[in-house]
Amino acid sequence: MLRSSARMFALYPLLFLGGCATHHAPSFSLFGAYFPGWMLCGIIGVFVAVTLRLLFVVSGIDAFLSLRLFTYVSLGVIAALLVWLVWFGP
């Protein structure tokens, strides 16, 4: 009895592998390798956050921010989600 329940427990992760075989996972061929779409959107979000930080420092807005880390992380996440929505949205 213990062997059959252990075998069934070992087979449970196989149920979730069906989602990996769908053709709806967006990926791009960049420089001969396939990159997932979420990684590309995340990199764009980091780039936008760094660019906005540089613009805020130059313009003097950075001095008025109280929670700088939270602000720049939020701006990066918003940019990444907007890129995802525009690129892969309905």
Image: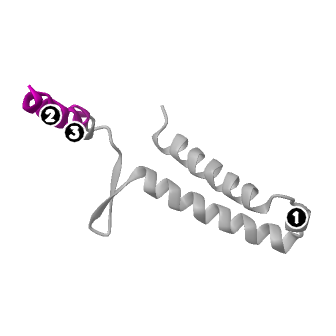
Q: Which of the marked residues, 1 or 3, is nearer the chain's N terminus?
A: 3
- The residue pinned by badge 2 equals 6
Q: Nearer the viewer, mark 1 or mark 2?
A: 2
Residue 45 position (above or below residue 82): below
Which residue lies at the image location 34% right of the left edge and 55% below the top edge?
Answer: 28
Measure how far apart labels 1 and 2 are at the Cα level.
60 Å
Which residue lies at the image location 91% right of the left edge and 62% below the top edge?
Answer: 64
Magenta region, main secondary structure: helix
**Any mark on residue 11, and which?**
none
Q: Nearer the viewer, mark 2 or mark 3?
A: 2
Where residue 84 appears, as percent x and y from the top left, is 51, 45
10 or 14, which is in the foreground?
A: 10
**Label 1 is placed on what type of residue?**
Ile
Numbered disc 2: secondary structure: helix
Q: Is residue 69 left or right of residue 32?
A: right
Numbered disc 3: secondary structure: helix
Q: Is residue 55 left or right of residue 7?
A: right
**Label 2 is placed on what type of residue?**
Ala
Where residue 17 appears, as percent x and y from the top left, is 23, 38
Which color mode does the image show? Answer: one colour
Residues tagged 1 and 3 counted as in contact (Cβ below 8 A):
no
Which residue lies at the image location 74% right of the left edge and 67% below the top edge?
Answer: 53
**Any mark on residue 21, and which?**
3
Magenta residues (range): 1-18
* Quadrant housing residue 16: top left
- The residue pinned by badge 1 equals 61
- Is 4 within the magenta? yes
Q: Which of the marked residues, 1 or 2, is nearer the chain's N terminus?
A: 2
* Quadrant housing residue 44: bottom right
Mark 2 neighbour class, 10 Å CA radius: few under 14, some 14 to 19, many 20 or more:
few
